Amino acid sequence: MFILSPSHLKSKKLNAKGFSLVVILLAVVIFAGLVYGTYFYFQQQRIKNINSFEECAKYYPVMESYPTQCNTKDGRSFTQKLSEEEQKRLEDEFKELEDSKSDSTNWSTYQATRFYQIEYPLDKYSIRSGPANINASWPGIINLEPNDIFNEEKPLAVTYQVSIGIKKNNEGYTRENLEQYFGKGLFIKYGKDSLKDIEIKNTKLGGLDALRIDGCCGGQVGVEANIVALKGDKIYEIIINPAQTSGNPDKNKAIYEKIIETFKFL
């Protein structure tokens, strides 16, 4: 009679236990595969059933664009529908931008050696030295002035002069208190009360941090925009003023914004 030794019995039990573990693992893998397959199937069905921006936005992040867009995983894109009023405004803005770009083939560059350069459309602007100012560092006040042809274009629209000045930072302004410089600059003087309802915005000038205000004080027509930035021991200031003041005030704004975008520190 053959009798199994204790070691043989133990080995047999271990083999049975190992077999059970394999079966359990296989069952888990099969179950996980079924779950994933079911999930994947319904995901694909859900993607296929998306047919609008609103449905897409429920499941996928929307892009920070205007108008807002949403993309599905299968490469389809949906754009948020705009009202007729919004669509017209967007088309008008695009046309103005394209018009301003079409002028960029005939732009010239003014360079203040070692300090800055700026570009301007030759068919619309001329460079002039501004009035003498004892507080202005070299090269003094530089004006980009709309020419007569630009000023008299029909239908009339407001044109804008761009003026640039550099001043030594004798007062020790820093990035933290530069907003106090507004109203004390090279171009116009005004008190704190003039700024109480004006937003001071963070912006960039030539890649550096700068501050900007829009629609302020000074003169009969006011200041369209005022930008200040610090570089080294100098304060750089740009001011935008209406030149020819009749007609549409918005039509030519894209042009002076494009001019400001070309500003570079040297």
Image: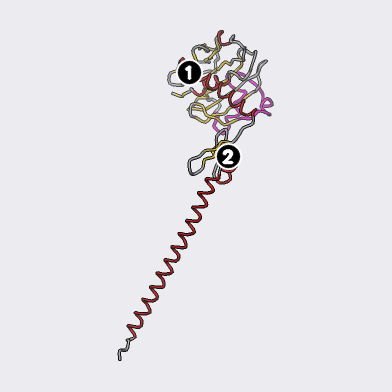
Q: Residues within 10 Å of mark 2 (few under 14, many from 20)?
A: some
The range drawn in magenta is 172-200
Residue farthest to the left, as pictured: 1
Q: Position of residue 39 (x, y in %)?
A: 51, 54
Percent x, y of residue 52: 58, 40
Which residue does the numbered mark 1 point to in the structure image? Answer: 104
Q: Amino acid at mark 2?
A: Phe
Residue type, mark 1 in image? Ser
Q: Quadrant of residue 253?
A: top right
Residue 108 in the figure: left or right of residue 153? left
Helix, strand or loop for disc 1: helix
Residue 193 vs 131, above or below: the answer is below
Residue shown at 55%/34% (left/top)?
65
State the separation of the CA atoms marked 2 and 1.
Answer: 36 Å
Q: Quadrant of the C terminus?
A: top left
Q: State yes or no: residue 239 in magenta.
A: no
Relative to the observer, which residue lies in front, 130 or 54?
Answer: 54
Identity of the residue drawn at 46% across and 24% down: 265
In front of the other: 206 or 19: 19
> In this rendering, would 150 be left or right of 8?
right
Residue 202 or 60: which is nearer the viewer? 60
Main SS of the magenta segment? loop
Q: Are marks 2 and 1 in contact (CB under 8 Å)?
A: no
Q: Is residue 134 left or right of residue 116?
A: right
Please tell me which residue is depicted at 52% across the width and 23% down the height of the picture: 236
Q: Earlier in the sequence, mark 2 or mark 1?
A: 2
Q: Quadrant of the N terminus?
A: bottom left
Question: Which residue is under mark 2?
Answer: 53
Q: Residues within 10 Å of mark 1 (few under 14, many from 20)?
A: some
* Above/below status of 61 relative to 132: below
